Every structure is written in C-alpha cells, then in structure tokens.
Image (tube, rainbow, N blue to C red):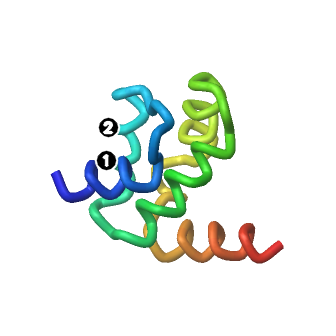
C-alpha cells in the first residue's frame, strides 16, 4: 500500500492505468527512490502503450535495483 501511495503522489492528478501501477509496484520492490524514478520515466513516456513499452524494454534481470537506479539517475543527469 505504501508503494502504491508513493506512485500516486508522483503521478499527482494524472491517471495511471492499474496494470502499469501494478507493474511499477512489482518491479521496484518497495525501494522509494526506484519507485519515484520508474514512475517518472513511465509518465514521461506519455500514453499507456508507451508506458507499457518503457516497462517491457527493460528485462527483469536488468531491473536489479542498483543497476537500474544508477542508469536511471545517469539518464536524468544527461
């Protein structure tokens, strides 16, 4: 529930499909910074189809928290 609340806080007044919300929750394993970064990446992707594409482009093995969080932060810096 805490992770879902954090996602909703990041999303604000925008609507995030429940399937995408559950995918974010499953992939982030409750790590707050990772939740925020992945949610922002999904929001920046735009439409629901694009959001699903953002999540599907990254293999489950590549979603290990340190590597993905590091990559996410580097992308933000770029």
- Indicate the secondary structure of the residue bearing disc 1: helix
Question: Split into 4 quadrants, where in the image is the C terminus?
Answer: bottom right
Image: 19 above or below 69? above
Circle 2 or circle 1, nearest the eye: 2
Residue highlighted by disc 1:
26
2 and 1 marks in contact (CB < 8 Å): yes
Image: 74 above or below 56? below
- Indicate the secondary structure of the residue bearing disc 2: helix
Residue 64, horizontal then vertical, whole percent = 45, 65
**Numbered circle sitting on residue 22:** 2
Density class for disc 1 (Cα within 10 Å; few <14, some 14-19, many ≥20) is few
Residue sitting nearer the eye, 20 or 58: 20
Density class for disc 2 (Cα within 10 Å; few <14, some 14-19, many ≥20) is few
Q: Which residue lies most toward the front here?
A: 13
**Numbered circle sitting on residue 3:** none
Residue sitting nearer the eye, 28 or 7: 7
Residue sitting nearer the eye, 29 or 58: 29
Please state if 34 lies on the left or on the right of 5 as rendered: right
Q: Residue at position x 57%, y 54% from top?
A: 40
Q: Residue at position x 55%, y 66% from top?
A: 68
Q: Residue at position x 60%, y 76% from top?
A: 70
Q: Which residue lies most toward the left here?
A: 1
Residue 49, horizontal then vertical, whole percent = 61, 23
Residue 67, horizontal then vertical, whole percent = 55, 72
As measured in the structure, the alpha-carbon distance from the residue carrying label 2 to the one carrying label 1 is 6 Å
Please state if 67 lies on the left or on the right of 1 as rendered: right
């Amino acid at each position: 529930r805490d992770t879902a609340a954090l996602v909703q806080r990041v999303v604000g007044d925008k609507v995030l499909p429940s399937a995408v919300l559950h995918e974010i929750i499953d992939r982030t394993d409750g790590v707050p910074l990772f939740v925020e970064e992945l949610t922002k990446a999904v929001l920046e992707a735009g439409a629901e189809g694009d959001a699903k594409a953002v999540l599907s482009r990254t293999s489950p093995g590549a979603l290990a928290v340190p590597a993905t969080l590091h990559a996410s932060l580097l992308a933000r810096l770029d």
